[in-house]
């Protein structure tokens, strides 16, 4: 039996881990929007995005930068009087957009998440300077490290690493990951 | 001496190395034994959840399972993002046996199994609860007298909510700052986000968020901003120059890990804590005090 799910159903079903209330409990009070520290940089406020999901405006929601502008600070989540985990909703939209390969073209977020995962799957650990360097054409990972260490007064002797060291059981670690996520798909 | 399974996390190997060094220094001064767990992996920070939720839980679960093998009870993370991921994974797996079974099937590939027995804690929590304010105060042989500190909690150490704790106006960081003899400033932005990884993915939003925090700390005359997370520290410290460039401001406020401040009060040297030389004596001179 096939069931046709609406966009709002799909998003609600994907919010599996969120043990809090579903988005249809939203009373459109705007506490999330008033709390969000990134709202000035969003196409639509979190309150409006919830309304748009409930109205099944899939294209408009996915093509907005709102969810990719979320820093996952959970400030809206702890304040929502309807008990909705709005930060988790933003994560859900990020996942949905990556899976469907549908998001605003000029955003760095989707690509960043994918290269982050790629780095972890390869090394087992992340290394921020190398990740940052990918998106800051003027800098190399060594430059970023150097700048950071100078700013914090920390001077290390010896050459700076450009990539993380692999963890010892990297093969086994990759086998763990493979049981969750087919590695070919983690671009 | 009480021992802990210590999970430093990736940042503490690179940009947050001074956090790791000062954390170890403070722990030894306080008689705590932080044992780094073997062959740990990245917790996924905030970048994993957009790709796959199950994978994000699995990453933290592997670290927790390695920690369980040590026989220790407490899983301690100094990074707020690592802490949040480990805490929520541990909690979720305990309440969802089916999910735990699925993740244990994956962990089996590395001969690991998670039961959810670890007590996941942030480093600051361990100092506050297991050592206690009285003991810290007693051991602070060089109290940071008259130094005004902005207690920056950030996000993921206190959010999402875990029980009925005060997430709107927590005070434990202020209490710790007072215990080492310093003065916590009234810092209304103390739980406002620093931007986290938006510093890479949405630079203008993150710089705006950082600038608001710097403004609040500066206008309340803080001598230093104290942090509990490597991402907060990097954003607030490293990007001041860019904020100044972007907003025409002139911020130049030191940012330090709480462990660096604590360590100095406990009698460690600036060198051992990776604090710039004469940092505290310069602040003391500025406010007309004799250098300690």
Image (cartoon, helix red, strand yellow):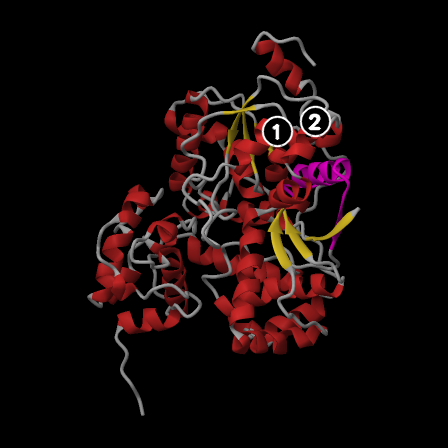
Residue at the extreme right: B1
Assess whether mark 2 and mark 1 are in contact (beta carbons under 8 angstroms).
Answer: yes
Q: Are marks 1 and 2 on the same chain?
A: yes
Task: Please report the bounds of the magenta region as a residue range.
Answer: B14-36
Q: Secondary structure at mark 1?
A: helix
Position of residue A98 measured from the top left corner of the image (x, y, whole percent): 41, 65
The residue depicted at 49 percent of the width and 28 percent of the height is B241
Q: Nearer the viewer, residue A157 or B139?
A: B139
Q: Which mark is residue B179?
A: 1
The residue depicted at 50 percent of the width and 48 percent of the height is B156
Position of residue B287 measured from the top left corner of the image (x, y, whole percent): 56, 10
Figure check: B124 above or below B286: below
Q: Quadrant of residue A180?
A: bottom right
The subunit carrying tag 2 is: B
Figure check: A7 above or below B30: below
Q: Which mark is residue B95?
A: none
How far is mark 1 from mark 2, CA to CA? 8 Å
Question: In the drawing, does residue A85 fall left or right of residue B170?
Answer: left
Q: Which mark is residue B140?
A: 2
Figure check: A81 above or below B60: above
Quadrant containing the N terminus of chain A in the rendered view? bottom left
Name which of mark 1 and mark 2 comes first in the sequence: 2
């Amino acid at each position: 039996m096939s069931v046709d799910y609406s966009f709002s159903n799909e998003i609600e079903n994907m919010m599996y881990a969120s043990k809090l209330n579903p988005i249809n409990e939203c009373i459109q009070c705007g506490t999330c929007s008033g709390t969000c520290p990134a709202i000035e940089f969003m196409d639509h406020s979190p309150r409006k995005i919830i309304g748009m999901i409930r109205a099944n405006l899939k294209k408009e929601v996915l093509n907005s930068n709102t969810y990719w502008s979320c820093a996952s600070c959970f400030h809206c989540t702890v304040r929502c009087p309807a008990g909705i985990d709005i930060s988790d909703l933003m994560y859900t939209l990020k996942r949905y957009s990556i899976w469907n390969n549908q998001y605003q073209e000029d955003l760095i977020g989707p690509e960043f998440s994918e290269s982050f995962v790629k780095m972890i799957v390869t090394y087992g650990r992340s290394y921020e300077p190398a990740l940052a360097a990918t998106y800051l054409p003027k800098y190399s990972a060594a430059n970023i490290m150097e700048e950071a260490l100078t700013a914090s007064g920390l001077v290390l002797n010896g050459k700076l690493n450009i990539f993380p060291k692999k963890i010892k059981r990297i093969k086994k670690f990759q086998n763990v990951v493979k049981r969750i996520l087919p590695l070919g798909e983690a671009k | 001496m009480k021992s802990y399974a210590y999970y430093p996390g990736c940042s503490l190997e690179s940009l947050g190395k001074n956090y790791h060094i000062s954390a170890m220094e403070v722990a030894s001064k306080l008689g705590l034994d932080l044992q780094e767990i073997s062959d740990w992996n990245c917790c996924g920070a905030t970048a994993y959840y957009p790709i796959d939720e199950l994978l994000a839980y699995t990453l933290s679960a592997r670290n927790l399972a390695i920690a369980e093998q040590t026989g220790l009870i407490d899983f301690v993370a100094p990074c707020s993002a690592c802490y949040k991921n480990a805490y929520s994974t541990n909690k979720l797996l305990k309440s969802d046996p089916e999910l735990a079974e699925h993740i244990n099937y994956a962990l089996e590939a590395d001969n690991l199994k998670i039961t959810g027995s670890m007590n996941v804690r942030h480093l600051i929590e361990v100092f506050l609860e297991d050592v206690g304010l009285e003991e810290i105060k007693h051991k602070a042989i060089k109290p940071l007298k008259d130094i005004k500190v902005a207690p920056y909690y950030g996000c993921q150490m206190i959010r999402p909510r875990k029980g009925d704790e005060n997430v709107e106006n927590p005070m434990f960081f202020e209490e710790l700052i007072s215990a080492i003899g310093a003065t916590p400033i009234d810092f209304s932005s103390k739980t406002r986000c620093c931007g986290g990884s938006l510093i890479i993915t949405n630079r203008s939003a993150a710089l705006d968020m950082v600038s608001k925090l710097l403004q609040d700390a500066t206008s309340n005359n803080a001598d230093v901003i104290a942090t509990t997370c490597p991402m907060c520290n990097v954003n607030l410290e490293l990007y001041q120059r860019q904020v100044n460039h972007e907003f025409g401001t002139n911020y130049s406020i030191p940012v330090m890990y709480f462990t660096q401040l604590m360590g100095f009060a406990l009698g460690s040297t600036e060198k051992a804590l990776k604090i710039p030389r004469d940092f505290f004596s310069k602040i003391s001179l500025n406010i007309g005090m004799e250098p300690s």
